[in-house]
Image (cartoon, helix red, strand yellow):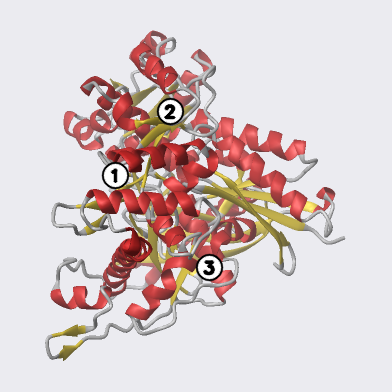
């Protein structure tokens, strides 16, 4: 019997789902549902239901062997400051280390507790763990925080103190706890502490998402493993991700690279994944994304999470159009809901736009509506809201209200800014998606609303006249200027990524290319990529043919480019990596650092052989825990040796890195 995989991707505007043949990777069905920012689970359930219905003639749900999800939940939660209240237990940290962790700035509400203990570079104990103080602090905090992180100095050399602290927290509380050495093999203690604290803060959020998706699967009679895409492009079982949700940072962009590699048939290319909110650009070599050795960013802070090396900017189909006093069109980094989509969801808004147009005053403000995020339950609001926040939410109610009428007071404007950041409310505006509707390049939402929005904003800044005879042409010209701005900014991003150089956007040579002029006085200018440009994501089909023309080449927009992320989720592989280090001891011999306490060897060959064995066993076991089947293991050894000596006597230090790839076990 043929088996099938389902891939699901939650984007800023749409949640996409695909079903593919697990053996041939033939795409059987695709479906889209609006992403419900107020409750991501609703959009996921709707997309899952739609794709199952679409494929009903080809398969039965008992043939579905895998469901894989790429999600923005972790990234969005850390950016928006959401998650559990946390206590960070820091063992052996100095004042400087606490400062360098940036915990105070990144999570101002976190309780930071310092305890004596920790280890040295070689894994030897700095001083004994102060268990009495640790127990006292845990008992004080157990009823005031919801989660704990534990970080000790040089815990990757010796994790004994971290593990003892973790066990004590588990014995004294029912709270989730993360030990830093379980997330990263990086030596940077302060950064490990921040990474661990970020991680444990969002454990409950990912747990709730997994439960909700599994519930949606049950409703569709799907009895299959649930996998989640990690930030490095690999997949792991949902149960293993619950304890390490921070590994899903950049999950969506990573899935897009895997999907683009498959549907384009290319192994070396630059990918531009353009969505509603952001454009993500990365270089792909040999079919796999380059990883950022410095660690992924989360909420503006560096972590030790290995994730795709991708440049992300706020540029998408839903970017807000702005016009300056000179009448120059630009795109803001923030996302707004396109007027064409708002009027599809709330048809009565068209009448309000027409009435404002008839009045002829305040036209720019008249296209900005405020409304609650789709899926938000007013009877079960998110935590952390003040009584004033709740009052404002109820004043907005079920229907869009003009932004200016809701924000008459400065306090309300400040409050709305916070609610917008948390995704509880949304604001409408004119976007490139609206411009595409007005130009006839898109039609899934209200074309009438898109034209009205262009007319009102353009007329507000004197770019569209009051002459009825010229109206259609002027609306078209204004929409084209918005379209061209989107194309120019997308082209600029690609130039910088391909060149590895951060050109100024007003560089005359760059301007000539991205604006499609290719001429500077008597100089002809042409930038030609040495690798293909592959564009995926919903708006790619609309904007990237024009981007390709800027480079005098055809941009590759594969079939099913609009659901590349979901395809990447469906065909992803499990990838495990571990690092074991070997160091010399002062008295001669070697220490092997893996898991708990260092292991002593008198001979380097014995230490290296044991490191290979342990590394191979570790990645194999982890792959199986993450839902993998058979594995392919690659082991690399980096040595530091004294010169002019036999290898069995010259070793000073070594790093053994094991990586394995495994398909999900079906």
Q: Look at the numbered disc 1 and give the secondary structure of its residue.
A: loop
Spot occupied by residue 611 in the image (x, y as percentages of width and height): 49, 56
If the image is split into quadrants, where does the N terminus sit? Answer: bottom right
If the image is split into quadrants, where does the C terminus sit? Answer: bottom right
Cα–Cα gap, marks 3 and 1: 34 Å
In terms of depth relative to the viewer, which is nearer, 395 or 233? 395
Task: Say if residue 584 shows up in the picture.
Answer: no
Residue at which label 2 appears: 83
The residue under the point 31% across, 22% down is: 109
Q: Is residue 656 left or right of residue 416?
A: right
The disc placed on residue 228 is none
In terms of depth relative to the viewer, which is nearer, 507 or 615? 507
Observer-side mark, 3 or 1, equals 3
Q: Look at the numbered disc 2 and give the secondary structure of its residue.
A: loop
Residue at which label 3 appears: 260
The residue under the point 19% across, 32% down is: 99
Residue 385 quadrant: top left
Chain-order first, disc 1 or disc 2: 2
Q: Is residue 376 left or right of residue 352?
A: right
Cα–Cα gap, marks 2 and 3: 32 Å
Local crowd at mark 2 within 10 Å, few (<14), some, or many (≥20)? many
The residue under the point 72% across, 54% down is: 665
Spot occupied by residue 13 in the image (x, y as percentages of width and height): 49, 47
Local crowd at mark 1 within 10 Å, few (<14), some, or many (≥20)? some
Local crowd at mark 3 within 10 Å, few (<14), some, or many (≥20)? many
Residue at which label 1 appears: 188
Task: Say if residue 374 shows up in the picture.
Answer: yes
Chain-order first, disc 3 or disc 1: 1
């Amino acid at each position: 019997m043929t088996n099938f995989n389902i891939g699901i991707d939650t984007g800023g505007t749409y949640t996409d789902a695909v079903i593919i043949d697990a053996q041939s990777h033939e795409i059987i069905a695709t479906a889209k549902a609006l992403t419900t920012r107020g409750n991501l689970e609703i959009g996921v359930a709707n997309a899952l239901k739609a794709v199952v219905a679409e494929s009903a003639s080809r398969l039965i749900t008992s043939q579905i062997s895998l469901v894989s999800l790429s999600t923005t939940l972790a990234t969005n939660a850390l950016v928006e400051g959401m998650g559990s209240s946390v206590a960070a237990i820091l063992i052996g940290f100095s004042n400087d280390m606490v400062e360098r962790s940036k915990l105070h700035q990144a999570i101002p509400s976190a309780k930071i507790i310092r305890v004596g203990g920790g280890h040295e570079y070689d894994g030897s104990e700095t001083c004994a763990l102060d268990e009495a103080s640790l127990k006292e602090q845990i008992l004080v905090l157990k009823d005031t925080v919801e989660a704990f992180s534990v970080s000790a100095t040089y815990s990757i050399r010796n994790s004994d103190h971290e593990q003892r602290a973790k066990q004590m927290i588990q014995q004294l509380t029912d709270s989730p706890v993360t030990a830093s050495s379980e997330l990263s093999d990086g030596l940077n203690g302060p950064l490990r502490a921040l990474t661990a604290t970020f991680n444990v803060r969002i454990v409950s959020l990912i747990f709730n998402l997994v439960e909700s998706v599994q519930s949606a699967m049950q409703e569709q009679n799907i009895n299959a493993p649930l996998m989640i895409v990690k930030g490095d492009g690999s997949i792991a079982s949902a149960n293993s991700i619950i304890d390490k949700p921070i590994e899903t940072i950049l999950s969506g962009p990573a899935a897009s690279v895997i999907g683009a590699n498959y549907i384009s048939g290319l192994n070396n290319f630059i990918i531009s994944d353009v969505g509603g909110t952001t454009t993500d650009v990365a270089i792909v070599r040999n079919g796999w994304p380059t990883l950022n050795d410095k660690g992924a960013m989360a909420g503006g802070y560096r972590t030790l999470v290995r994730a795709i090396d991708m440049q992300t900017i706020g540029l998408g189909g839903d970017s807000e159009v702005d016009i300056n006093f000179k009448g120059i069109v630009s795109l803001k980094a923030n996302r707004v809901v396109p007027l064409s989509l708002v009027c599809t969801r709330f048809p009565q808004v068209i009448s309000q736009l027409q009435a404002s147009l008839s009045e002829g005053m305040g036209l720019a403000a008249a296209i900005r509506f405020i409304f609650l995020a789709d899926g938000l339950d007013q009877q079960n609001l998110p935590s952390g809201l003040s009584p004033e926040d709740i009052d404002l939410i109820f004043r907005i109610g079920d229907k869009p209200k003009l932004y200016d009428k809701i924000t008459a007071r400065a306090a309300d404007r400040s409050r709305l800014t916070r609610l917008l950041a948390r995704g509880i409310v949304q604001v409408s505006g004119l976007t490139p998606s609206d411009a595409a509707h007005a130009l006839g390049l898109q039609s899934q939402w209200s074309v009438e609303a898109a034209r009205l929005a262009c007319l009102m904003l353009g007329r507000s800044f004197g770019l569209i006249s009051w002459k009825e005879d010229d109206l259609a042409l002027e609306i078209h010209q204004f929409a084209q200027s918005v379209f061209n701005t989107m194309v120019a900014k997308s082209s600029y991003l690609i130039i910088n990524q391909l060149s590895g150089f951060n050109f100024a956007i007003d560089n005359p040579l760059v301007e000539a290319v991205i604006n499609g002029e290719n001429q500077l006085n008597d100089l002809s200018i042409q930038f030609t990529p040495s690798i293909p440009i592959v564009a995926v994501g919903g708006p790619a089909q609309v904007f990237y043919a024009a981007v390709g023309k800027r480079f005098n080449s055809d941009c590759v927009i594969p079939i099913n480019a609009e659901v590349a992320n979901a395809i990447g989720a469906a065909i992803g592989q499990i990838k495990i990596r571990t690092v074991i280090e070997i160091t010399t001891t002062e008295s001669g011999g070697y220490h092997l650092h893996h898991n708990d306490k260092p292991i002593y060897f008198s001979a380097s060959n014995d230490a290296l052989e044991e490191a290979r064995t342990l590394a191979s066993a570790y990645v194999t076991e982890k792959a199986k825990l993450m839902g993998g089947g058979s594995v392919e293991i690659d082991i690399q050894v980096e040595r530091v040796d004294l010169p002019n000596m036999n290898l069995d006597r010259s070793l000073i230090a070594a790093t053994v890195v094991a990586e394995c790839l495994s398909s999900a076990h079906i």
